Image (tube, grey):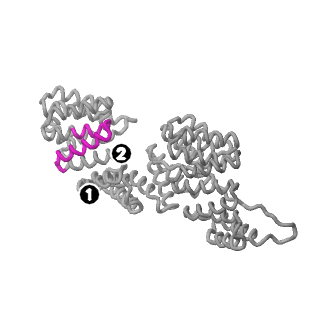
């Protein structure tokens, strides 16, 4: 999954400097200003000390309560921050920024309703508070109330057309609604206002990636790296785009950079592991993939995707028992609908252990969650073939073909059905040829008794079958022929 930037606008209220030229400022003012300086330098403990001094000198100093609240909020101590903002509001009921900042703290705690209340109060005091409208839009967006979110982002832009972040926020709502063209337009406007807006480039890259326009996504993520060369997530996104383009070497370089900048980035380890797994073909790549998945799970023990991917790598090494354990963990920690793949994977491992009835139960679960999962129908059909349940096998292969008429495996499996169940060589060869025409090219596996050859049996020793394979094997070797994904 690509990483996005979702920003809300933070504010630190700086007290007006109220002293006569040539005279030293009051002690609480000096301490407050010193605290702000430390806050901006992210020296939070020193900032708190100075805000404490200001409050000790003048317990009615609302600004220092607000500013100390900002420090607590940045430290993730939202409860303490809310106490300080509330005290500032008690001392100054017209303190719009204190309401605004308390809204940020409630948002940080996940309490969007209270955040919205505070943003509304800030706007009532200051009707031109564009940042409050923007952040209220973010709160409505988090509640999936996209209509209200759009209204508030639009109002923020009406007040301040140069508020780049409001355009970015609006773009993200359009993306979530599936209106990709509008999202791209809003991100473009954000970039026109602020050419250094890394979040706009990142999120526009997400839209391009979702649309399958990997080159434009790559350009936007490269721009993000140019603006923020120390941002690990930007390199992670580049790695994912390069992987999607089949440029594995470049993908690994970027995942390596993401890990170097953030060694605790479980996603980067999982992404790099997927490249090693995809390269496959020999034990070393699978072992490297498993090592990366191990690290991802160590960093995030509930990482369902990493368990699923590690299960696939172990399956590829024929370690079916360990694969089953990993698929089971993926099922435990995952949510629908992606958990269907884990059920399907566990079914495959059980199938290879010849526990066909248990495999069928897992394929049933996969199909219940995702009724359009073609692989689950194909593989359940093969399990039915192994248990001589011919008609159910036929129904599953036909269903797979109905869902995806271009799927080569359903044709391949129908060929096997006609051979094993009906002993109809002519019909079997017809479907095998249809499979080859649709792109099946794992020809060596058709003669390997440890792979698909075990389903075909004696037919793969016939002159007719060997001649048919030879005909399409020559075609498959021609330049530009895509490699076909495996059935199971």
Front in this rendered view, residue 322 or 181: 181
Front in this rendered view, residue 200 or 30: 30
Q: Quadrant of the C terminus?
A: top left
Residue designated by label 2: 336
- Secondary structure at numbered mark 2: loop
**Is tag 1's residue or tag 2's residue first in the polypeptide sequence?**
1
Q: Are marks 1 and 2 in contact (CB under 8 Å)?
A: no
Q: Nearer the viewer, mark 1 or mark 2?
A: 2
Residue 39, image x, y percentages? 66, 65
Front in this rendered view, residue 255 or 482: 255
Work out how far the residue at label 1 is from the one at label 2, CA to CA, in angstroms.
23 Å
- Secondary structure at numbered mark 1: helix
Question: Magenta residues?
Answer: 353-380
- Quadrant assignment, res 430: top left
Residue designated by label 1: 322
Residue 277, image x, y percentages? 36, 51
100 relative to 456 in the view: left or right: right
Name the residue: 21% across, 44% down.
Answer: 361
64 relative to 284 in the view: left or right: right
Per the image, is 364 magenta?
Answer: yes
Residue 373 higher or lower than 19, as above or below: above
Residue 197, image x, y percentages? 63, 48
Give the crowd class for mark 2: few <14, some 14-19, many >=20 residues within 10 Å. few
Name the residue: 74% across, 70% down.
Answer: 28
What secondary structure is the magenta-colored segment mainly? helix
Per the image, is 316 magenta?
Answer: no
Name the residue: 59% across, 49% down.
Answer: 117
- Quadrant assignment, res 270: bottom left
Residue 425 higher or lower than 336, as above or below: above
């Amino acid at each position: 999954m690509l990483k996005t930037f979702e920003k809300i606008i933070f504010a630190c209220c700086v007290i007006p400097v109220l002293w006569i030229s040539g005279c030293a400022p009051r002690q609480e003012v000096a301490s407050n200003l010193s605290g702000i300086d430390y806050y901006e330098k992210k020296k939070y403990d020193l900032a708190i000390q100075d805000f404490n001094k200001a409050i000790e000198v003048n317990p009615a100093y609302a600004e220092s309560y607000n500013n100390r609240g900002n420090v607590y909020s940045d430290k993730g101590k939202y409860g303490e921050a809310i106490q300080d903002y509330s005290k500032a509001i008690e001392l100054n009921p017209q303190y719009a920024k204190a309401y605004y900042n308390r809204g940020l703290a409630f948002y940080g705690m996940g309490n969007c309703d209270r955040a919205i209340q505070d943003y509304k109060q800030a706007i009532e005091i200051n009707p031109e508070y564009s940042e409050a409208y923007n952040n209220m839009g973010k709160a409505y967006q988090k509640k999936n109330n996209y209509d209200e979110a759009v209204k508030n982002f639009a109002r923020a832009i009406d007040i301040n057309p140069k508020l780049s972040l409001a355009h970015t926020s609006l773009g993200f709502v359009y993306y979530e609604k599936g209106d990709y063209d509008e999202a791209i337009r809003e991100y473009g406007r954000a970039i026109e206002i602020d050419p250094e807006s890394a979040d706009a480039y990142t999120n526009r890259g997400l839209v391009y990636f979702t649309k399958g326009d990997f080159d434009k996504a790559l350009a936007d993520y490269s721009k993000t790296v140019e603006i923020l060369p120390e941002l690990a997530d930007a390199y992670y996104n580049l790695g994912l785009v390069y992987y999607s383009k089949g440029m594995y070497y470049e993908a690994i370089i970027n995942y390596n950079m993401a890990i170097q900048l953030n060694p605790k980035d479980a996603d980067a380890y999982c992404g790099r592991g997927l490249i090693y797994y995809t390269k496959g073909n020999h034990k070393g790549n699978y072992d490297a993939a498993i090592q990366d998945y191990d690290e991802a799970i160590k960093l995030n023990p509930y990482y369902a995707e990493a368990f699923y991917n590690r299960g696939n790598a172990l399956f590829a090494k024929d370690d079916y028992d360990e694969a089953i354990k990993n698929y089971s963990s993926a099922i435990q920690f995952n949510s629908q609908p992606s958990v269907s793949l884990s059920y399907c994977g566990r079914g495959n491992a059980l199938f290879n252990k010849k526990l066909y009835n248990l495999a069928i139960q897992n394929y049933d679960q996969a199909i219940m969650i995702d009724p359009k999962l073609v692989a689950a129908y194909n593989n359940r059909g093969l399990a039915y073939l192994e248990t001589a349940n011919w008609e159910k096998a036929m129904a599953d292969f036909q269903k797979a073909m109905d869902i995806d008429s271009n799927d080569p495996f359903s044709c391949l499996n129908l060929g096997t059905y006609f051979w094993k169940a009906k002993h109809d060589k002519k019909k079997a060869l017809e479907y095998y040829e249809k499979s080859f025409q649709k792109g099946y090219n794992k020809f060596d596996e058709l003669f390997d008794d440890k792979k698909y050859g075990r389903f075909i049996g004696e037919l793969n020793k016939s002159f007719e079958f060997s001649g048919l394979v030879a005909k399409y094997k020559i075609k498959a070797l021609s330049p530009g022929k895509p490699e076909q994904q495996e059935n199971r």
